[in-house]
Structure formats: C-alpha cells, structure tokens
Image: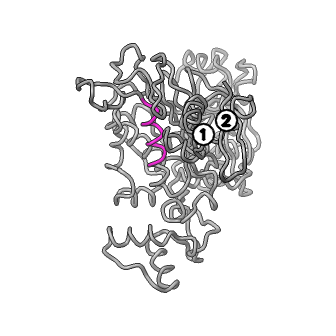
C-alpha cells in the first residue's frame, strides 16, 4: 500500500472493516480489537491516524514499540493466536502509519485474555452476550449445528406411525418395541441426545406435534391483493405446522391454488397448467426448510402478490456463500442431520447445491436477496402480468354459481363464502372451506368479518341452525 492508496482508504472513514488509532499503548485493548475483527469478516487498523482522518503519524521509535506490542497481542493475548500482517506507509513528513491487517478467523470464536468474545458492530465492537450469538459463532466454525440442539421433548413425543414407516421403507427395519431400544436407535441415528431427549432434527422430522415443542418453526403464508403488504386486507392466508413433510405439502398446495392456470397450447376444455412450474416451488421450499437458520426463532414467510412470490427464510447465507455462488450451484451445509434425512426421501431433495439451479432452469426470472443485517434470505419469483397469460378461465365457479371477475382480481374469500352460503345456508364453515378450496381458518376469519359488517348472520342453535345472507 502506498501513500495515495492509504489516503483513499482513510477518506471513507471508520466502518466495520476499517478502524483508526492515533497510537496504541495497551496490548490487551488491541487484542480485543483483533479478536472482534477475526470473529467478524476481518479488517484493517490504521495506527497513526486520528478519528477525523488526519495523519499525525508515528515516529520511528513509536513504530518499533508498537510492532512489538502487536506481536505480543496477536500471539499471546488472543485465543487462538492470530497471524496478522503489518505494512508501514511513510508520510510526506517522514512520519509513519502502520497498516495492521487482521484476517477473517478460521478458528472462531476468538477470545481475549479474559475469555471475552468480541464482535464488530459498525466501527465499534461489543461483547457476545447471548447463547444464540455464541452458538452462531460455533456454527460458522463448523463446530456446532442448530439441528443438533437438544429439545425438551422426550422419546414419547415421537410420531410412531411416521417413524415406523420411515424405518420400514428406508432401512427395512422394524419399529423397536421397548423404550430403551427406541432411545438407543434414535441416538445412533443422531436424532436424540445422550440424555435421551429428541434433538431439533428429530422433532422437526418425526415428532407427532412439532409445533407444540418448537412453535416458531412454521411457515406463514399470505396471498395479498395487489403488489404491497396490507395490514388487514388479504385474499388467502394459512399457517403450516407439523413435521417438515407436512409443512412442505401444505405450503406447496397454498402456492399452487393461488397461481393462475394457463392453456399452454392445450384445448379449451383442458384443466390448464400452472403459470409457473410446480417444480420451481418444490425446490425453493425444500431449500428454505432444510437450509434456513434454526438458531433464529422465527417462521418462514411466504408472501404472494400479483406480480411476485416471496419466500423469506430466517438467516443470511452462511460463511463465504454469496448469491452469485448459489446461482452457480455452490452450497454450504448448515443443518447436516436434516440434509442427510431429507436426502433419504422425506422431501423431494435432489442433491446439495442443485435446488437453486434446477429452479432457475425451470423459471429464470427469480431474484435472491441476502440481507446480512436483517439476517434474512429471500427468494423472489416474478410472475408475468395477467395480460401476457392465456388463462384457462377468466371467472370463477362458486357452488354452481358462475362469477365473472376481472382477470386481474381473484375472487376474495368473503365473496366466495357469501355466494356459497346464499345458495346453501345449511352448510358448515368446514364444508364451505372444502368446497371453495380454502383453509378452515381462512373461512372462519372471512365469516367473522362478514358477520361484523352485517352481511351474514347465523340463525338458530349451533346444531341445526342456518346462515342468512343480507341482500
């Protein structure tokens, strides 16, 4: 680095990768700065530079002293020791700036002399003060994986039928009769801890009611009208819980029922094909379920708009992965136990790193956003405008009643409910939901709105009563 390059870098000011110090006299303080850089993405410390970017520089005597201090701090006061690089840049007045480069650590987490773990936060640093952050550092260094986390669920929470069928179909093995045998088998399969409790992978794949144990690991799906998120206005919504295969099936069905059907060269009486191939969403949903960060206590969100579909997963891309790399087929295993079992047929998984490429081959108009600050990864599937689609049906058939709707506007759930109950007032909400292809919860919310607005009223006892629709 020469003086011109130094000046250019300093002109940008301090940030998470660049720090200024007029002088350094405390080796322990410097060691904590090094540890913070190593636990993050590495960075550069400019010694002999003031906070305002001016260049007072260092004397030759200062340089000699500070270089010795740097050596001691990196080798003796950081655990594990760091290999750093220094470069002396001579200023016009023969003063010197030391450019100290700290690499991104390969043996995270790094501690200072007192056992404190530091992370960079903008131009400053802070202590790691939560178990979640500590786990993530171990996860990055491949010393720990979230799907290994112990849960509070005992072996009795296992879905016997689901696990029995898996053993029979994949391992050609019978379901163990005794609790001790089942526990030992689950431990050998990396699905239970040494203490005999199911780990997170065991719960997500084989527990009878995973949402009772880990309620945050679900998929929340909403179909909005238009192209923006609305606080109260939606066309369809449903939460999907249960073992991963059940979540996958429900989320995929939600997407497919909210897509347009196009003729695609078929006859007018043909049922039509989805506007976007189903395979695209198979790959993206599997990717979201298997590779999300389970250290983040949040659901996967599935948002459908007129012009796009977003699948938002907790956790940004791990380690050195970038959007460009995943588009090229590169991958990184964040949850190895889940991956190993999904590859045995629990989900339509076709190999590490191939899902994104396969989705792009079927539908090229997909964007990926890696939000490092928000700790989110978003896959956005862009839809064609309705005018560009040769739709099979530009209207809707609700309970035998033909409803002509504008092509751009799907029939809303409350309208479907009213139309159906007007002709069949004796139907239950569960029957209505089945008839119109919506979830029971979506129909219950729609009917509650209709009752509140005075458009719908239930008359008579709970059993044997009927609905009245206001004209």
Residue 255 lies within the magenta run: yes
Q: Main secondary structure of the magenta part?
A: helix
Residue drawn where x is 54% and y is 56% of the image: 242
N-terminal label among 2 and 1: 1
- The residue tagged 2 is 468
The stretch of residues the image draws in magenta is 249-259
The way the protein has been coloured in the rendering is one colour
Q: Position of residue 197 (x, y in %)?
A: 59, 73
Q: Residue at x 54, y 63 (%)?
A: 203
Q: Secondary structure at mark 2?
A: strand
Residue 248 is at least partly visible in this image: yes
- Marks 2,1: beta carbons within 8 A: yes
Q: Secondary structure at mark 1?
A: loop
**Residue 58 coordinates in the image, percent (x, y):** 70, 27
Identify residue for label 1: 425
Query: Which residue occupies 57% across, 75% down?
Result: 156
Kindly identify which numbered label has been placed on residue 196: none
In the rendered image, residue 431 lying in the magenta stretch gets the answer no
Locate the C terminus and report the quarter of the image it occupies: top right
């Amino acid at each position: 680095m020469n003086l011109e390059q130094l000046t250019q870098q300093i002109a940008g000011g301090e940030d998470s990768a660049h720090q200024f110090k007029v002088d350094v006299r405390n080796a322990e303080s410097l060691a904590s700065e090094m540890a913070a850089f190593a636990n993050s993405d590495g960075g550069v410390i400019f010694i002999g530079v003031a906070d305002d970017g001016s260049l007072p520089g260092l004397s030759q005597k200062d340089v000699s002293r500070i270089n010795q201090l740097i050596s001691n701090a990196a080798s003796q006061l950081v655990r594990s020791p760091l290999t750093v690089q220094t470069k002396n840049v001579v200023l016009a007045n023969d003063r010197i700036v030391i450019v100290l480069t700290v690499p991104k650590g390969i043996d995270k987490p790094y501690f200072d002399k007192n056992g404190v773990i530091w992370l960079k936060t903008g131009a400053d640093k802070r202590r790691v003060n939560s178990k979640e952050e500590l786990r993530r550092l171990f996860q990055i260094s491949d010393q720990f994986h979230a799907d290994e986390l112990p849960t509070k669920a005992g072996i009795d929470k296992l879905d016997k039928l689901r696990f029995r069928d898996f053993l029979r179909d994949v391992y050609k093995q019978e379901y163990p009769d005794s609790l001790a045998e089942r526990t030992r088998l689950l431990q050998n399969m990396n699905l239970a801890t040494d203490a005999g409790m199911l780990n997170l992978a065991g719960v997500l794949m084989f527990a009878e009611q995973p949402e009772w144990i880990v309620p945050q690991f679900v998929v929340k799906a909403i179909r909005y009208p238009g192209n923006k998120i609305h606080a109260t206005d939606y066309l369809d919504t449903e939460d999907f819980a249960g073992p991963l295969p059940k979540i996958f099936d429900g989320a995929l069905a939600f997407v497919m029922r909210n897509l347009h059907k196009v003729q695609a060269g078929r006859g007018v009486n043909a049922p039509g094909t989805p506007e976007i191939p189903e395979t695209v969403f198979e790959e993206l949903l599997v990717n979201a379920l298997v590779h999300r960060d389970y250290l983040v206590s949040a659901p996967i969100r599935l948002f459908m708009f007129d012009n796009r579909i977003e699948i938002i997963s907790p956790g940004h891309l791990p380690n050195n992965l970038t959007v460009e790399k995943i588009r090229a087929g590169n991958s990184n295993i964040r949850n190895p136990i889940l991956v190993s079992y999904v590859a045995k047929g629990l989900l339509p998984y076709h190999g590490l790193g191939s899902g994104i490429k396969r989705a792009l081959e079927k539908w090229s108009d997909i964007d990926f956003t890696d939000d490092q600050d928000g700790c989110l990864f978003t896959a956005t599937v862009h839809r064609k405008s309705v005018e560009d689609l040769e739709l099979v049906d530009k209207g809707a058939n609700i309970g035998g009643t033909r409803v002509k709707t504008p092509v751009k506007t799907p029939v809303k759930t409350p309208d479907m409910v009213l139309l159906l109950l007007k002709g069949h007032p004796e139907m239950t909400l569960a029957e209505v939901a089945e008839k119109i292809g919506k979830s029971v919860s979506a129909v219950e919310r729609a009917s509650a709105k209709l009752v509140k607005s005075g458009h719908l009223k239930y008359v008579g006892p709970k059993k044997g009563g009927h609905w009245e629709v206001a004209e």
